[in-house]
Amino acid sequence: MEADNAEDGLKIILKEHPDIIITDMKMPVMDGTQLLKKLEELHIDSKISVISGFSDFKYTRLAIQAGVIDYILKPALRSPVR
């Protein structure tokens, strides 16, 4: 399933109990840091992977503290230069 923002994503997570959550850090309504904190407070045991354009260590550190299994910097895939 897919959500347009973290708030809707949280609703889906609470309803569906996914094994894996893939999220971004910058989203409308609630950002990724808020979502990670909320998931931690709710003791959500899904595996979480973050895909983000933020290489700032504060985001990486927060992700590690939240038990994120992977932090991938965007752009993760680049098209070959032609």
Image (cartoon, rainbow, N blue to C red):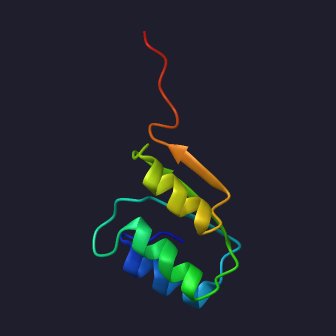
Report x, y in % for residue 10: 48, 81
Residue at 40% across, 80% down: 8
Q: Which quadrant does the C terminus fall into?
A: top left
> In this rendering, would 29 be left or right of 11?
left
Q: Quadrant of residue 66?
A: bottom right
Please state which of residues 29 and 40 is positioned toward the viewer in this rendering: 40
The residue sitting at the left extreme is 29
16 left or right, relative to 33: right
Vertical order, 28 against 13 (above or below):
above
Quadrant where the N terminus sits is: bottom right
> Which percent across, then down, holds residue 31?
36, 68
Nearer to the camera, 42 or 80:
42
Q: Residue at x 36, y 69 (%)?
A: 4
Front in this rendered view, residue 58 or 50: 58
**From the viewer's perspective, is residue 71 above or below residue 63?**
above
Q: Residue furthest top?
A: 82
